[in-house]
Image: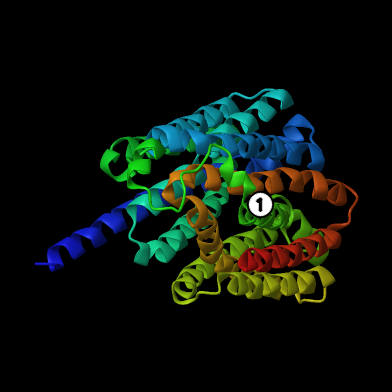
Amino acid sequence: MTALPASATIRSDIRVIGLIGFAHGTSHFFHLLLPPLFPWLMPEFGLSFTQAGAMMTVFFVVSGIGQALSGFVVDRIGPRRVLLAGIACFVLAALLLSVANSYALLLAVGAVAGLGNCVFHPADFTVLNRKVSSARLGHAFSVHGLAGNLGWAISPLFLTGIAAAAGWRAAALGAAALGALAWAVIWFSRDTTDALPAQAAERRQDGPAKPTTFGFLGVGAVWMCFSFFLVITTAFGALQNFATPVMQNVYDLSVAAAAATLTAFLLGGAAGIVAGGALAVRSESHDRLIAAALGGAALVALVIASGILPAGSVFLAMGAMGFCGGIAGPSRDLLVRRAATANFGQQAYGRVYGFVYSGLDIGLAVSPLLFGPLMDGGRFAAVLAGVALLQGLAVLTALRVGRI
């Protein structure tokens, strides 16, 4: 008598996890709408590394501000309509890119894509936390992160492949087509993406207190989670935007080989997320797990920065650094969930996740401004040393969250 309900719950969890993972992969694909096309856009529009990086700064400034605000919208109207609006912005951004004829319009592309990106973390985590069984949340967060990394890995291959064959404008149109497909998938999955707005959730309150609108800002753990995302993604942004030219100059790699090191980093991160999901389910010390993983990543970054590795081994080292960083992902998301539920239950998921993950966007916005001048000044190894320093700071913030 109990087998059927349990089986139905498992099937429901799988559907929710799979669909939200797909949505998250879409958002990460559009994170990289512009960077893979830099080799075409920079000469055509006469851009420096700093100017090219500024397009991503615009993306993440808009996304960071929007993410902090969109959490309130998710709590008010539910996640489904917010997800659809975000994907629609991605499609519009890709279409604008396909007709861009000035640097100003490229900056507008970054802004529109950033507006689309801002909705995903508060909407995704609201659905996962409300609709997936607690026993499978660690795996849900693992799949969520894995799908994001796969979106990152697919985007450069997809966009550069089309751009090399048919030009960068055709690549932008291809991205718009993929975005339209993703929008249709979410549209036809109403039952899976619907979740109660916060007002309705209050009737099923599972937290110790009914939250005031901005009450979450008085919680120290929320601010430390925000700080963690800020520093770790500032480091990640340096690699996302500049890994290929860094590896070309530090290790004298070809463009193709240098680009492959970024792919290795992203795929290593995906593998690390899978392992991290299994470890997070079995561990209660999520802060220590994060610290160990990111400490390992920082050490690998320093080794790469030293320039002592044989050129052929850089691919493996980047994969190892990505793997260590990926292990931290699911535990990181569980720490944020604890910060939310310990004070307000499920009623403030959108607000807490939106604010905390806005640190991610701010870090990615600051990163090109911080590391772009180092790139323009030819200080390529210093970029990798900066990555290691920021990963070390992330270790300290994670340990601090664990003690709050």
Residue density around tag 1, few if under 14, some if 14–19, many if 20 or more, within 10 Å: many
Asked if residue 26 shows in the view, the reply is no
Residue at the spot 48% in from the left edge and 31% down from the top edge: 91
Left or right, 110 with reference to 140: right
Estimate the x, y position of residue 216 in percent, counting from the top left: 57, 46
Q: Nearer the viewer, residue 94 or 160?
A: 94
Left or right, 379 with reference to 235: right
Estimate the x, y position of residue 186 in percent, counting from the top left: 35, 39
Q: Nearer the viewer, residue 23 or 224?
A: 224
Residue type at the position of mark 1: Trp
Q: Residue furthest left?
A: 1
Estimate the x, y position of residue 14 in percent, counting from the top left: 30, 58
Total marks shown come to 1
Kindly state the secondary structure of the residue where label 1 is placed.
helix
The colour scheme used to paint the residues is rainbow
Asked if residue 303 shows in the view, the reply is yes
Residue at the spot 70% in from the left edge and 71% down from the top edge: 314
Does 125 sit above or below residue 4? above
- Which image quadrant: the C terminus? bottom right
Left or right, 313 with reference to 212: right
- Which image quadrant: the N terminus? bottom left
Q: Nearer the viewer, residue 6 or 103?
A: 6
Left or right, 251 with reference to 334: right
Tell me where residue 258 sits by quadrant: bottom right
Q: Residue furthest front?
A: 209
Does 95 sit above or below residue 350? above
Residue at the spot 55% in from the left edge and 52% down from the top edge: 152
The residue singled out by tag 1 in the image is: 223
Estimate the x, y position of residue 268 in percent, counting from the top left: 57, 67
Q: Residue furthest right?
A: 377
